[in-house]
Amino acid sequence: MREQSRLVAGVRASALPGVVLVAFLSLCAAAEAQQKTFRLPQLDGAGELTLEDFHGKVVYLDFWASWCGPCRKSLPLYEALYQGHEPAQFTVLAINLDEDKEDAVRFLQQHPVSYPVLLDPQGVSAADWQVKVMPSSFLLDGSGAVVKEYAGFEESHLEEIRHDIQVLLDGRNSH
C-alpha cells in the first residue's frame, strides 16, 4: 500500500507541470477569445449586439469615428459592399468610437449606412482589438476568427477587401 501511495504521489507530482501548462494555455486561449469580442449598444437604440450574434456569417468589422477623414470615404463604400452581398452570409458591422453619440449621428446623416452601427465611447473594444489607426477593420470568418486586418483606408484597398470577402464566402459555400 505504501509503495502504491508513493507511486500515485509520484505520478501526480510528475503530471503537475503538464496540468499547470494545460491550464495556463487554456487561460491564454480564453483570454484571447475574450479579447476578440464585445457587447455594445446599437446607435439606433435597438439594443446591444455581440460578435456572437453574427456567428456563421462573414463579418467585416470596422472601427471608425466622426473625426476620421478617411472614414468619410470608407463608410459609403462599405455600404455598397454590404448591399452587394447576401445578408444571410455577410455583414458589415461598424463600431463608432466618438465620445459623444451626437457626433456619430451627425456624421451618419451625411454618410448614411444601413448596416449595424455600435457605440463604444470609452474605446474599450478598440483597445481589446488593438486598434492603432483610424479607421481599422477586421475580416472575420463564420466562426468569428480574424482572417485579416486592414489598418487605415485608401479607396484602392477596396478591391483587395472585396476579393478577401469573396474568397471567404466561396470557401463557406463550398462546404
Image (cartoon, helix red, strand yellow):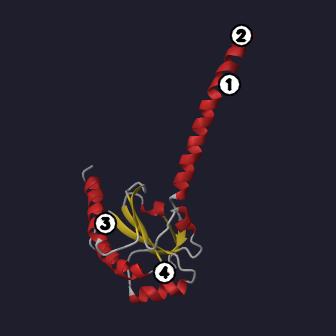
Counting residues from the start of the chain, the first of labels 2 and 1 encountered is: 2
Q: Residues within 10 Å of mark 1 (few under 14, many from 20)?
A: few
Question: Label 1, label 4: how many angstroms apart (C-alpha)?
Answer: 57 Å
120 or 46, nearer to the observer: 120
Q: Residue at x 47, y 89 (%)?
A: 106
Q: Residues within 10 Å of mark 4 (few under 14, many from 20)?
A: few
Counting residues from the start of the chain, the first of labels 1 and 4 encountered is: 1
Q: Give the residue pinned by disc 2.
A: 3
The disc labelled 4 sits on which kind of residue? Answer: Asp
Q: Secondary structure at mark 4?
A: loop
Q: Residue at x 38, y 70 (%)?
A: 92
The disc labelled 1 sits on which kind of residue? Answer: Ala
Nearer the observer: mark 2 or 4; the answer is 2
* Label at residue 44: 4
- Tell me: 128 left or right of 85: right
Q: Give the residue pinned by disc 3.
A: 161
Percent of width and height locating residue 113:
38, 80
Q: Residue at x 63, y 31 (%)?
A: 17
Q: Give the residue pinned by disc 1.
A: 13
Question: Label 2, label 4: how many angstroms apart (C-alpha)?
Answer: 70 Å
Q: Are marks 3 and 1 in contact (CB under 8 Å)?
A: no
Q: Are marks 2 and 4 in contact (CB under 8 Å)?
A: no
Counting residues from the start of the chain, the first of labels 3 and 2 encountered is: 2
The disc labelled 2 sits on which kind of residue? Answer: Glu
Farthest residue, direction right: 2
Nearer the observer: mark 2 or 1; the answer is 1
Percent of width and height locating residue 147:
38, 56
Q: Can see residue 1?
A: no
Counting residues from the start of the chain, the first of labels 3 and 4 encountered is: 4
Q: Secondary structure at mark 3?
A: helix
Q: Are marks 3 and 2 in contact (CB under 8 Å)?
A: no
Nearer the observer: mark 3 or 4; the answer is 3
